[in-house]
Image (spheres, grey):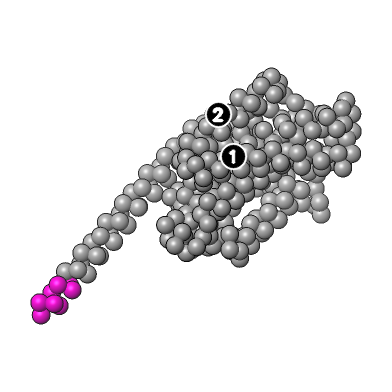
Amino acid sequence: MFKLRPVANRSLLILLVAIVLIMSVLNPRRFPTLMNLISMSYQLPIIAFLSIGMAITMLSGGINLAIIATANFSGIVTVLFLQELAGEAMTKASVFVTLLAMGGGLAAALLIGAIMGFLIAYLEVPSILATLVVMTLLNGVNIVITKGYTLSGFPPFLLGIGNEMLWGIPIPFILFVGVCLLLAVILNRTMFGVSLYLAGSNPTAAQYSNINVRSVLMRTYLLSAFFSALTAVVMMGQLNSVKANYAESYLLVAVLACFLGGVDPFGGAGKLSGIVLAVVILQLVSTGVNLLRMDPYFIQVMWGLITIILIVMKLVNTRWRERQQLQAARHLQENQMREGRG
């Protein structure tokens, strides 16, 4: 469950250590510092939540291109609830009112997840098409609601989730660790986790095993939407604002983290630890590039190139395995024929 060969994780660990050493040599005064580590602990959960939300759908053999749009929509709905419940005193809203507003944002995200799940599971629309349509629709809705403006001015409780510390550890990082532990239990110790892997690797076999594949897909996209809502909360807390097109560049990063972390884009295979390591590696590279004061657009070009390389490597590896299996089958058949003649 959520597993690949241990070699993959060892390779990621080696890559992680290599990046830390290289960045420490290139920028010894700013990179290997406690302040930088704390800063990355605040930034990492956003990319991690989006990557995990993407990985869950990939495990089912699908994809969710609407994770960013869903996160922005969830954040905007949260602000609408805050405005309705607290009015002009939104910046002074109580914890109870803030939690109600956050609940409204979560409900909005889950509604989007249910729509995507219904399109994919029951109407059998290809996931890439269904989520692309939903993403385009949400981007338009987000712009219409906000009129293209940035909505800002949030209550202390919400800001604290994104910026405060607990026991000397950034709250976003605590949320990240807690959610990862919970997700590991769900995927490894529950029937849903078993069903998700089987449905992703072989839907036909899953049906014959009395697994309700449609129900699994529906819950998968609901869970993915939950991570979008969680991303929205952390982003709102850190930025003290929401906008229709926040974090659009993170969509490619989320896909890249899945490939780098060893999630099979065709479904049925992947490891949570691989995703976590991949996200940490990407965060280290991003932080290192920023500290070196390189062009910020360079990092996006680099993400794109790395993604293309990983996709090509995956396809080549898949073709090579298929050829090896075919050759092995032929050799076995030839040996059986020889034994039959003998």
Drawn side of residue 84 relative to residue 217, left or right: right
Identity, as a three-letter code, of the amino acid under mark 2: Thr
Q: Position of residue 180 (x, y in %)?
A: 65, 55
On screen, 319 above or below 241?
below
Can you say which quadrant of the picture contains the C terminus? bottom left
Give the residues in magenta. 335-342
Q: Residue at x 67, y 33 (%)?
A: 73
State which mark lies toward you, 2 or 1. 1
Which residue was labeled with disc 1?
115
Work out how far the residue at label 2 is from the one at label 1, CA to CA, in angstroms: 14 Å
Q: In this image, 56 relative to 129: left or right?
A: right
Mark 2: which secondary structure?
helix
Asked if the stretch drawn in magenta spans residue 250, the answer is no
Main SS of the magenta part reads: helix
Work out whether 269 lies above or below 150. Answer: below
Q: Position of residue 114 (x, y in %)?
A: 61, 43
Which sits earlier in the primary sequence, circle 2 or circle 1?
1
